[in-house]
Amino acid sequence: MAVYSYKCPNCLGPLAFDPDSQTFSCEYCLGSFTKAEIEASHIHTEAEQISDAAEAAALNATAEAAEMLLYRCPSCGAQVVTDATTAADTCYYCHNHIMLEGRLGGEYAPARIIPFAISKEQAQQRFFDWVKSKSFVPKSFFSKKQAELISGVYFPYWINDVDLYASANGRATDVNVWRAGNIEYTRTKTYRLRRAGNIHFEDITNLALSGVDRELVTAVQPFDPAGMRPFEMPYLSGFVAKRRDIEAEQLQDEVERKIHDYSAELLRDSVSGHGSVSMEEPQVQIKNLTWDYTLLPVWVLTYRGADGKLYYYALNGQTGQLAGKLPVDKGKLSLTALGVFALTFILGVLIGGVL
Amino acid sequence: MRKLWQLSLLTLLMLALFAAPAFALAHVQDDAGLFSASEAEQVEQALLDAEELCPGYSFFVLTTDDTQGMSAREYADEYYDVTWGYSSGTLFLIDMDNREIYLCTTADAEAIFGSGDIDDVLDAAYDPISRGDYAGCAIAYAESASAIIHAESNSGSSVAPYPPGYDYNDYYQPQPQNPIARFIHNLTGQKLLIAFGVAAAVAAIFAASTVSSYKSVNHSGSEYPLSSRSDLQLTEQSDTLVGNVVTHRVIPQNNNNGGGGGGHHVSSRGISHGGGGRKF
């Protein structure tokens, strides 16, 4: 399959998509170019595929050995191996940005992409600002040198637009209590409810890659659909891109469940003016369901803490939303908890002595 | 002969004069004019019997047409305070202005009469007065109240919070004058324990919530913003009334005005009384 790489028209240096300016910049001569200008300057070579199991084993490959790809970097000719799902990467030796055309073409051609809007420096800064704002993170945890690896990854998603008809029945109860003289009256009104209508859901987002921390990557959603662009390969330059390994059929059940839950919530919210409302499960008739294969930008950051453990963080490459687990400085927390205890106790004693 | 006639006439006149004050009875003041002469005598006799049964306690019946804006309780308390002050006894008021019968108890009688006892007296007195028999009502008070006091004095046991003849000042612990000493005096062991418990709970909740928020993946929004990415066009919308039921219950009335436990209160003159009333 073909391996693409984009070169600077001026100095033949590696070109990368710059999130700050949303154009393509050369890392050597600092020139800035539009997509049209660089279209002509890509080079490509043919990639060799490993089919021999023995060779795969020799390379210490995983179960996806059959799909392991050995290719030659178009710039420096070094042999580089990628795993089954990588569709774009950077050559480890010469730092050129590579796109694997075969993994982005045909049925694997993404329809849309949201280009990175947050640059690497911004991502790192956001991460450090977030950690700093948490007062119980051990002081030794965060130091700029500890950011082991931050890489911008385009993750693959299946995105749905749905048109459906949903209907649900329910009951509502209104209770009214009043007094006349020494008698207390209670009026209970019961209603039978019915709600039905046409619903349109836009951009239901489903991660289409296994082998990653789904919870972490999903936690940085939502993405803003306004940033969607038709897919073009140059956007990937400078970043890692992953090809999907979950097909639409495998996600059908999960999507239907989401549709069901969202429809129930919408129908429930359309009921107003009653005390207690309970709706039955809705009947859902899907009239139209589209699947768009889309690449969305996520900064993935690994951090080695002072305790030696590796911590993972995800940062939305468009909105900057951060997700991850932080360690807790037990000593500082205990001390603060003790302070809270002492303050509350003193307050209680003061109130008790005065009352 | 002439002197004998003059003497006997004088005697008759004096007898008549002394007989007249028989209407001003020692235990009855019928300002509302509810009793006839003979009825008043009967009531007086019943009260004398009561005082004989319960030595050291006064019994009195008061009726009025106009409480001058006071409640039955205030009127009864005021009369008692002015007449006897703080001394053991009971007063029964038939208040035609507020249409209420009221029993006022003081000192040892206040201690003896619990709210159940007061209800017993009011129950006994309510029957006659609901039939318009005011004298019968007063006599019922005399009989029931004296029976209760007599039973209490003879039983040897006292359900009263304080023994008869107590002096309030013996049991009242004045607060220390010094504000710091008063502060420490106010701080019981129980209060310290509660303060400790609450402080521990608050600190524990703080620590636990901090740890859980750090250890969980930071979900600061929802994965799918439903309201901005959805659109609902209702084709059917119906709320049909299928049931309309009204139930009712009678709220039990508390006939004891002045709170439970015998209606203990302090009158405007600063004297403690018990008691209770009932509208008729």
Image (cartoon, coloured by chain):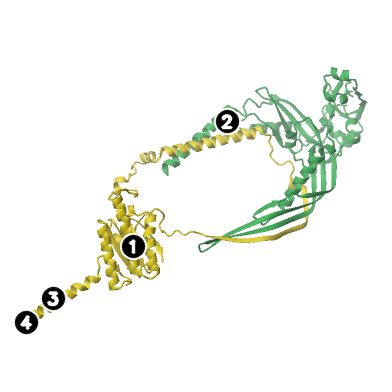
Chain colours: A green, B yellow
The disc at residue A333 is 2
The amino acid pointed to by label 3 is Thr
Tag 2's secondary structure?
helix
> Is the residue under label 2 in contact with that under label 1 (CB below 8 Å)?
no
Tag 4's secondary structure?
loop
Mark-to-mark CA distance, 2 and 4: 120 Å
The amino acid pointed to by label 2 is Leu
Q: Nearer the viewer, residue A304 or B278?
A: B278
Mark-to-mark CA distance, 3 and 4: 15 Å
The answer to which of marks 1 and 4 sits earlier in the sequence is 4
Q: Nearer the viewer, residue B205 or A227?
A: B205
Residue A222 visible? The answer is yes
> Is the residue under label 3 in contact with that under label 2 (CB below 8 Å)?
no
Residue A302 lies, in percent from the top left, at: 72, 27
Q: Nearer the viewer, mark 1 or mark 2?
A: 1
The disc at residue A25 is none
The disc at residue B11 is 3
Label 1, on which residue? B141
Label 4, on which residue? B1
Mark-to-mark CA distance, 3 and 1: 38 Å
Residue B78 visible? The answer is no
Tell me if B68 is positioned left or right of A315 in this view: left
What is the quadrant of the C terminus of chain A in the image?
Answer: top left
Tell me if B71 is positioned left or right of B231 in this view: left
Residue B215 lies, in percent from the top left, at: 65, 32
Q: Chain of mark 1?
A: B
Q: Quick check: B44 above or below A330?
A: below
The residue positioned 76% from the left and 35% from the top of the image is: A317
